[in-house]
Amino acid sequence: MRSLFDFVGGEAGKWRVLSAAAVRGAPLDPVGYVDVRPAGGDVPATGNAWCLKGQISNLRYATRAEVTALRSSQESLGRTQARRAALIPIRKTPAWWDLAQDERRAIFEDQSHHTEVGLRYLPAIARQLYHCRDLAQPFDFLTWFEFAPESADAFEELVATLRSTTEWQYVDREVDLRLERQG
Amino acid sequence: MRSLFDFVGGEAGKWRVLSAAAVRGAPLDPVGYVDVRPAGGDVPATGNAWCLKGQISNLRYATRAEVTALRSSQESLGRTQARRAALIPIRKTPAWWDLAQDERRAIFEDQSHHTEVGLRYLPAIARQLYHCRDLAQPFDFLTWFEFAPESADAFEELVATLRSTTEWQYVDREVDLRLERQG
């Protein structure tokens, strides 16, 4: 039922950090590796720089038509060829959270075309959103992407497009970690 | 920023239990009192039957027009004359959570008139919704109401109206605790 995950930054892990940038606001402490683990499983690792928690939850804006379009073309995480990943934690401003649902939906899709933009890059770029606003975390969302090295340019385009939207004017903290799978 | 609360059922607390009913699904263990506390404050009480956690979060369905209507007539918790309260934890079915946003909104308001019904009972019945679906809790929401004893009949009407809606067909667990303030 519950799908809570730990994103652990430290000196070991499945994903090696290729680059880390503080796009807006405070950075995360530099780490060499990121590991993604179901929460509460193993003994918590010690000596890690940070642990971000995120929860897979229900979709908050997508209409049925959009859900159908997404499900028909998106691929799951863990594909063999998807040796690159990006972990982009973001936090939105209090002004965003004070908007009504119709106002957030209008900015998210009608103005910023968030789902529509993401659809253009399916199935090459697999995505998973983890929620953490209700978990007393430093970010509201952990966004996670997986793709093959040959889709790296397309991924840059996707990220640049989203960052140019009206929606992104409500982002007040964003860190961008690019990762390469080990083994 | 964060507004996480513990709803503690036990042998002491600000609110004395007048009645407790398992409306749908499993009951909660019987208790004499309920206390509502900001989470993480004092030492956790021992010997309590249960502790439900809930988080004040952003509105998920209300439009700007509805938010404006709500804010113009709702009253806050803690009014002197509001000596009665109700704690009604509810859980919704997986089918509900698998609906797209537009489908949930259509059931919530267009078909079930959830906000419109609630507005009819403002300002007499003060309400606060606490989210817990993302907190690994046995319920999805803790709904909390405060009113003066003379509004008790109106409150019964409000609850009966909501339970008769299409939205409530997606509720698979609901417990209803009626409370009286001590002192």
Image (cartoon, coloured by chain):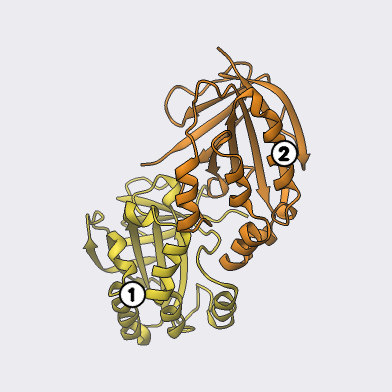
Chain colours: A orange, B yellow
| Residue B119 or residue B14, whichever sits in front | B119
Which residue occupies the foreground of this view, B98 or B114?
A: B98
Q: Tell me the residue at 45%/80% (across/down).
A: B116
Quarter of the image where one finds residue A129: top right
Q: Would residue A102 be found to the left or right of residue A2 on screen?
A: right
Circle 1 sits in a helix, a strand or a loop, which is it? helix
Name of the residue lying farthest toward the bottom: B150
> Horizontally, is A89 left or right of A60 in the view?
right
Which of B126/B83 is in front? B126
Image coordinates for residue A39, horizontal then vertical, percent: 46, 32
Separation of disc 1 and disc 2 at Cα? Answer: 47 Å
- Where is residue B149 shown, x and y percent of the image? 36, 83
Judging by the rendered image, the residue that carries numbered circle 2 is A157
Query: Residue at (74%, 42%) from the top-left corner?
Result: A160
Q: How many marks?
A: 2
Residue that extends furthest to the top in the rendered view of this protein = A183
Evaluate whether residue A160 shows in this view. Answer: yes
Q: Residue at x 53, y 79 (%)?
A: B74
Amino acid at circle 2: Glu
> Which residue position holds label 1?
B162
| Disc 1 residue type (three-letter) | Leu
Kindly identify which chain the residue marked by label 1 belongs to.
B
